[in-house]
Amino acid sequence: MPKTMTAMDEFAVKLARFVIAKRWLVIFATLLATVAVTYGGQYLQMSNNYRDFFSESNPELRAFEEFQDTYTKNDNFFFTIVPESGDVFNNKTMAMVEELTERAWQVPFSLRVDSITNFQHTWSEEDDLIVEDLVKGAEAMTAEELAEKSQIALTEPLLKNQLVSRDGRAISVNVVLQYPQLSPFEAPEAAAFVRALRDDLLEKYEGHKIYITGVSMLNMAFQEAGMADVTTMIPFMYVLLLVLMAVTVRSVAGTVVTLLMIAFASMIGMGAAGYYGVALTPIAMSAPTIILTLAIADAVHILITMRNGMKEGMTKHDAIIEAVRVNFLAVMITSLTTAIGFLALNFSDAPPFWHLGNISAVGIVAAWLMSVTFLPAMMSMLPARAPKKAQTTGESFFGKLADFVVAHNKKLFYGIGLGAVLLISAVPQIEFNDQWTEYFDESIEFRRDADDSTEYFGFYPIEFSVQSTGEGGVSEPEFLQKLDEFTEFLRAQPNVTHVYSLTDIMKRLNRNMHSDDASWYRLPDDRELSAQYLLLYELSLPYGLDLNDRINIDKSATRVTATLTNTSTLETKVFLDAARGWIANNAPDYMQTTVPTSAQVMFTYVAERNVESMILGNIIAIVAIGIVMMFALKSARLGALSMIPNGLPIVVAFGAWALMVGTVGFSVAAVASVSLGIVVDDTVHFLAKYVRGIREKGYDRAGAIKYAFETVGTALVVNTVVLVIGFAYLATSHFKMNADMGLLTALAITFALIFDFLFLPALMLRGSGKMFAGQNKDSDGVEKNVQTQAAE
Amino acid sequence: MFKHKLQNNVTAALVATVMGVAALSPAFAGEAEDKGFEIAARSDRSDLGFKSSEVTAVMTLINAAGKTSTREMYFKTLEKENEEVGDKSLTVFETPRDVEGTALLSHAKILEADDQWLFLPALKRVKRISSTNKSGPFVGSEFAFEDFTSTELNKYDYKFVGEDTFDGMKVDVVERFPRYENSGYVRQVALVDQEVYQVRKIDFYDRKDALLKTLMLKDYREYEGGVWRAHTLEMVNHQTGKSTTLTYSDYRFGTGLEDKDFVKGVLKRVR
């Protein structure tokens, strides 16, 4: 064995002896550290703001924040009301909307409430301009009055398809909110209020359905999905852990200690996040599941070795020391590489992935440290019986597998290589889709309500701040003309359900000012006239229904809102590109700065933003892990070579996903980092044993491969099964990003095992022996360490 | 401590009530209500007797991003005849240029919609605005028209809350509750100084009783006849982060304006 290995072994033995001797101190210190770090958990908050998915430097977020500073915030509740009678223009439904509109002003943090009942209907009578609520006193309206209101509402461009569906089957109330953002309980408070309001109205007005959507409900859904995950997934993971321990370790004491160790590691990870002041998203909340999955491996390796040692007749303390010594290096390297992979998530653009990465990395490191301190200390105290010596079964399964791989190495090399190439060629077919509603499964109320609401109304607003020549420029006839063309263009686009534009207001006012003569329903052709119309209109509007959210303060720009129906990210991109194209080709110079913005725009590009930034992060992680591998294997060439079985399974998993599923949310950007560190573990274990086989045992390549199979085959399979179950279980998350990430990672880990068992050995047998044998000729100290190999 | 003081004030109000001051406010019997009304009435009446006034004003609007925009206007006001009706006012816009010469004539009402006529120079027509809305933003600012025009005593019900100090002054804290059904406010909290009885600060609470806006009235100056006027009014909207500053230049009082200067017909001639 090389010198440093010996030094490492010596250190491990010293550490184990110290830990056993001072076990009370170690246990006490572990508890103290755990309590101290976990104390930070009190600062943890649940995120209920979709903005938490975007970093401060995200260009789409910045554009949208600027937009909102100019106009108004875009948080809202959108009530969709559907009467069973099939037509909303009846006394009961109208009275319901009137009451909802009135009571919605009581929603905490509400700024504005819009519905057809409080729509400011303008009309003229001689020289009077009358401005009034479109519907008032609905309960007592006659059939003629209702018919008149229906006619007005269904021809008014500001209402049709936004506040009442074109067929009159559904009606809506939109509540705009502005949260002070001083407390994490603001959104839940408002959501609780609107839900109670909904229940109250449903009871009072039978025969109606109410669906609540909007950004505020989306924000609540993030929190509720996270909570649902925590309450269902974490208990399952602990049950899984118990089962696994029962199967592999078969020791009550070992199971209890592992349970404690993993719970502590999770608590430390989350506690550290608390000190850091993290707002927990469903993504970050999958960290405990991930820590648990990864931490089991450390414990299982050590406990199995200890058990085998005792089986061979060692005393408990000797078996513990031996288990620490044999596993020390491998556990350290796998923990470090996994932590590096997770830390690479910090290159993501999305803060939830930073949190996931950092919490997991802290938990992984904590689990590693405990596995070589707390775990042996506890085991040295607890009773453990020596298992009966098992009869050895002739040629093992892995021995046969090794023979098979060696015999068919050429076929395997080219077969798997070809398969990999085919799957990789499918990768470009992956389509990103980040529709908010589909982030949630049907168990989340928001998803169900959104699905129902989109049958009647659009869902995704896209905002434009259309610039004019300067102060007061929105009244310029040329500007209004262009704005009108742009509005018409937007209305003609597929998937657009509604466009809110100043031009509709100007046309209506012009008509009102000319005795409601329909031929005057056109844009004023005089700048002063338009400006004075606006002044008149503003003077007549009530509290909360002003134009301040539509025209900026110096009247140099106005806001156009296009609402899209439930539209895929790809279709949204087509729309956005078309809008940009129209502006580039048709808009005058001063209008060229007009860009689409909104939460939907942010989500549309979130995949690109994250994939771009994660590519760099992953490259850095691969290099860092490669360096660790070079040191671990004591071979620069083997270290570099290891990147093939490390990197390939991930890319191949993407290819398989492209063929099986096709679409993926932006969480895919995290998959490479999450799986990289884990995939590396298999390679580390396999190559380490291969190198040992050649350097210490003096085997040829085929022999070394067989040695590696026989020594780590079982452990790798057990490990992979644990990891695949753990990550696959993330697929049951109520949050699609977690589900995608979990499934893809499980897929990558499975491929990794296939590559390590079937492709890596074949790769070793290709090319020159020297290339893959490592620098074994100069190694010394082989003999004295032969007896100290990891137990089979 | 505060409560004790409040008790004393309530007692004082009670005494005043017994002595017949309650006659000023026949509708309310509560002690705090009476005292609140008394303070408001004293403040309001301290400014009476100016007959008519003229003043120019600059409004500076500031949005949440810190961008600003200004409007200039000229106000003429004719004092109300009695407390059952409101002042008459004429607002003439000077800038932005697009609205220059646009004139708004308003006959304020106490419990009904104000009568309002607007002259649009570009249309060369006077339009009467029929709207029940009083609390909407004035020309895109954070002020409603009713926020900066004269406070009519009978527009509100009052309640005395207590005493406080504000900006080095001893002030009475009075809650006022709009009696107009279409008001956008559920209540206002006004601070009235105890020395010259002027309103120094008003907090406006929206329909859900959340703090909406705060108005600071600064730079008070005394004119002939003991009439006080604030020259800087700063309104901050706490919910949107927008604000507006209204700055008055020197007032002129008793300029000889009469009822005939506040009729629809004059609008076309104001330019």
Image: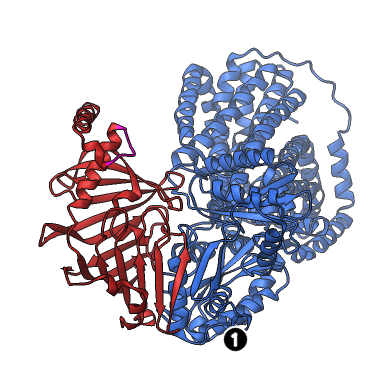
Q: Position of residue B71 (x, y in %)?
A: 32, 73
Q: Chain of mark 1?
A: A
Is A223 on the left or on the right of A566, as rendered?
left
Residue occupying the point 47% across, 20% down: A28
Q: Residue at x 26, y 50 (%)?
A: B201
Chain letter for the blue colouring in the rendering = A
Can residue A370 be seen by looking at this rendering? Answer: yes
Q: At which x and y percent is residue A738?
A: 67, 46
Start and end of the magenta stretch? Answer: B25-30
Along the horizontal axis of the image, is B75 left or right of B212? Answer: left
Amino acid type of the residue that numbered disc 1 sits on in the rendered structure: Asn
Asked if residue B29 is among those painted magenta in the image, a careful observer would answer: yes
Residue A387: x and y in percent read: 75, 16
Q: Secondary structure at mark 1?
A: helix
Chain B colour? Answer: red
Q: Name the residue: 64% across, 69% down.
A: A156
